[in-house]
Amino acid sequence: MIDVRNLDLWYGENHAVIDVTMPVHKNKITALIGPSGCGKSTLIRCMNRMNDLIDICRVEGNIDFHGENIYDPNADVIGLRKRIGMIFQKPNPFPMTIRDNITYGPKIHGITDKDELDGIVERSLKQAVLWDEVHDRLDKPAFSLSGGQQQRLCIARTLSINPEVILMDEPTSALDPIATAKIEDLAVELQKDYTVVIVTHNMQQAARISDYTGFMYLGKMIEFDETEKIFNKPNDELTERYITGRFG
């Protein structure tokens, strides 16, 4: 699905991602773990070229999506971001109604039929396990929702344009344990239809929900493997020290 090969990224003089190679497998959850500032979020932002928005950013290497390099000069970046959506650390609903948050993307992509838009709203909210909680107040402001509901609304907003891949950048770090559990359950449910990449500081979360895990340190991918192997029999001593709490 996604194949990262020999990827390097600089912010000015800061070499933030160093020669990273890793796969992202279709309909699987891939977790990225590691200490703060090790390059996890920067790496997933490369996967839909969000780093293009930073002037001092420079990228070398390849990220192939369905066999095509997304950093090719002729790549369709807008189309790429439709196919690879992103959920951020803090819920960021638009300052508009719940309904308008969901229909915003489809409208940008040319969908204007009210019945079709209504169907997208219902489908997306059901996929995000939010429909039953908000179906009778779709015209209320999105900010009237709780933090956990806002994050699921942001997931529904991403789903509204039918992506193939969902990137999640610490999506539960601002949420309470109950809301966190709902997002984790949702991620597991979504992998039936989507490919999920999640950055998390919560190693228990990675162990609970992911199929593959990559451990990063100081911009490098120290180890990447099936999650069970990473947590039970890692190859690298640094990985073992990190997951057993003997790090630093």
Image: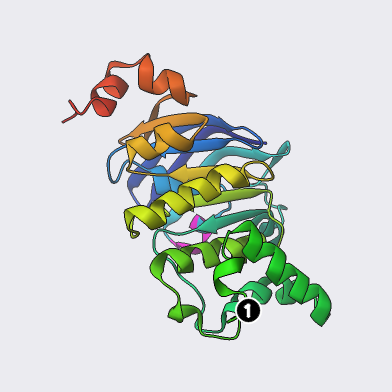
Q: Which residue is mark 1?
A: 99
Q: Is residue 133 left or right of residue 235?
A: right
In this orientation, does residue 149 appear? yes
Magenta segment's dominant SS is helix
Which corner quadrant holds the N terminus?
Answer: top right
- The percent position of residue 8, horizontal first and vertical second, equals 46, 39
Q: Position of residue 113 (x, y in %)?
A: 83, 80
Q: Which residues are magenta?
A: 51-55
Residue 28 located left or right of residue 18: right
Amino acid type, label 1:
Arg
Image coords of residue 155 (percent x, y): 56, 60
The correct choice, above or below, for 24 with respect to 122 in the image is above
Which residue occupies 64% across, 57% down?
127
Depth check: give the residue in front, 132 or 190. 132
| SS of the residue under disc 1 | helix
Q: Quadrant of the C terminus?
A: top left
In the image, is residue 219 part of the stretch drawn in magenta? no
Locate residue 188, reporting x and y percent: 55, 42
**Residue located 81% across and 73% down the image:** 116
Side of 103 relative to 179 (left or right): right
Quarter holding residue 161: bottom right
75, 131: nearer the viewer: 131
Does 36 appear above or below 76?
A: above
- Residue 46 appears in the figure: no
The question of residue 54 being in magenta is answered with yes
